[in-house]
Amino acid sequence: MDRQAIIPSGMQGIYQEWKMAPGHLSGGHIFLTGFTGVNPDGSISDDPEAQMRSAFDQIGSVLSEAGLDFGALVEMTSYHIGLRDHLELFKSVRAEYVKEPYPAWTAIEVAGFASEGVTIEIRAIARAG
């Protein structure tokens, strides 16, 4: 089976430091790592909406590197601290990015993330080509 790491410009540090690909092409799908609200420069906004947009923008970078857009998503799982506090906000931000046919989606409340101050992480799978 052919496999290929998808590493957009500016995300080489993720691949080298964390030993994980931002995206991985395998079996006709691209599996995206979970992207948090941490910006590519390492900063974290206190604003949940800014974190959501940062995570979606990073997903968009991986999709673009693979020649795809958000219409290629087939599955998405979002992890939240304070899910009920910002679910409606997340739904509205998400609606700006995802396209029909909408991907399957699961939202999960979690206790925490690796980086302090993060409130969101999004993991996704896209169809390739």
Image (cartoon, rainbow, N blue to C red):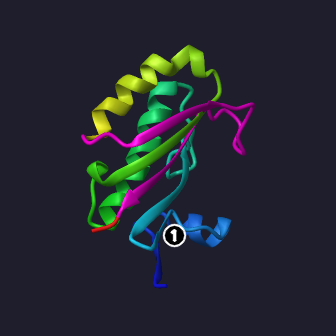
Magenta residues, as a range? 100-127
**Residue 72 x, y percent position in the rendering:** 30, 54
Q: Which residue is mark 1?
A: 12
Q: Nearer the viewer, residue 28 or 31?
A: 28
Amino acid on which the number 1 mark rests in the picture: Gln
Q: Residue at x 43, y 20 (%)?
A: 89
**Residue 87 x, y percent position in the rendering:** 50, 20
Can I make out residue 10 in this image? Answer: no
Q: Nearer the viewer, residue 90 or 39?
A: 90
Can I make out residue 67 in this image? Answer: yes
Q: Nearer the viewer, residue 114 or 32?
A: 32
Q: Is residue 114 magenta?
A: yes
Q: Is residue 1 magenta?
A: no
Q: Residue at x 36, y 51 (%)?
A: 73
Image quadrant holding the C terminus, namely bottom left
**Category of crowding for the residue at label 1, using alpha-carbon neighbours closer than 10 angstroms: few (below 14), some (14–19), many (at least 20):** some
Element assignment for label 1: helix
